[in-house]
Image (tube, rainbow, N blue to C red):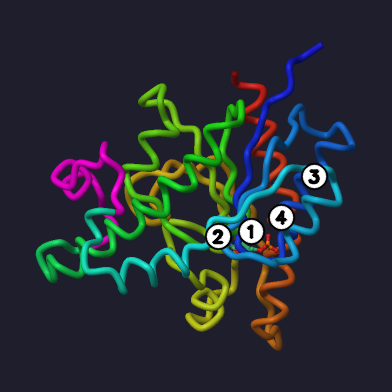
Amino acid sequence: MVEKLKIGTLISGGGTNLQAIIDACNQGCIDAEIVFTGSDVGGVKGLDRAKKAGIKTFVVDYARIIAECRNTRDVDSLLPTDFDPEEILKKQRLVDVEKDHEKALFFIKSRVIAERRLLDNIESYDMDLLVLAGFMRVFTPYFIDRINTNAPGHRIMNIHPALLPAFPGIDGYGDTFRYGCKIGGCTVHYVDYGEDTGPIIGQKAFEIVDGDTLEDVKEKGLKKEWELYPACIQKFAQSR
Ligand code: GRF
């Protein structure tokens, strides 16, 4: 019997991709099991989906942590002791350090503080792959390097609602629609130090016809996502 791939999942919202992965695991379509679901927002529907499936859950409230960082006089006192600002600022490709050094530094520090709390939860699980299923936060190299411990092997997967490298960022379907594209799609890729820039694992496309609204585009896209994500996870499981 094949040993199942142990996947950790992170979400921020409704969790329909999470549900597709849960169903694919339960139906034996992929050789995987979900060992936890974490969220950066409490009370979201995706957490209920996980609990219903008997999956352990946790919340690391990013908004609260970032507010705490803003309100303290000494952000540095909240930082993990193994954080090296020089190293992380040099590696990261999320913010323009030259443009506004102080703003960039605050961004990185506050995210690292949240990421340390995520890692404290994640590290208690035995996990082969981390799957971002609608997780609406970016990661700094501090977090990525602590997951990708077998460098250069990638262990973090993300799904993006556009055909990368077109339309990175937070509103892939919206950007695709507003640009007037006749083909939309979704992409599963590994996470690297940039935003939506990592190596592509799989893509699925769909047609956008005259009269389609943004809602239609999102609906068509999500249906493709639910097929694509389990297929990419299975590809990872088989390539071990
Ligand atoms: C999906 O469109 C995904 O591509 C994007 O956020 C959405 C999450 O949907 N990153 P859900 O929470 O899986 O329903």
**CA distance for labels 1 and 4:** 17 Å
Q: Which residue is mark 1?
A: 205
Is residue 20 shown left or right of residue 159?
right
| Rendered image quadrant of residue 82 | top left
**Which of disc 4 and disc 1 is earlier in sequence?**
4
From where the camera sits, is residue 167 visible?
no
Q: On the rendered image, what quadrant is the N terminus found in?
A: top right
Asked if 1 appears above or below 131 in the picture, the reply is above
Q: Which residue is mark 2?
A: 40
In this view of the protein, which residue sits in the foreground, 223 or 139?
139
Picture coordinates of residue 209 (x, y %)?
69, 79
Q: Residue furthest left?
A: 98
Q: Residue furthest top?
A: 1
Picture coordinates of residue 59 (x, y %)?
60, 55
Q: Which residue is mark 4?
A: 17
The residue under the point 26% across, 40% down is: 81
**Element type at mark 3:** helix
Looking at the rendered structure, the kind of residue marked 4 is Asn
**CA distance for labels 2 and 3:** 20 Å
**Element type at mark 2:** loop
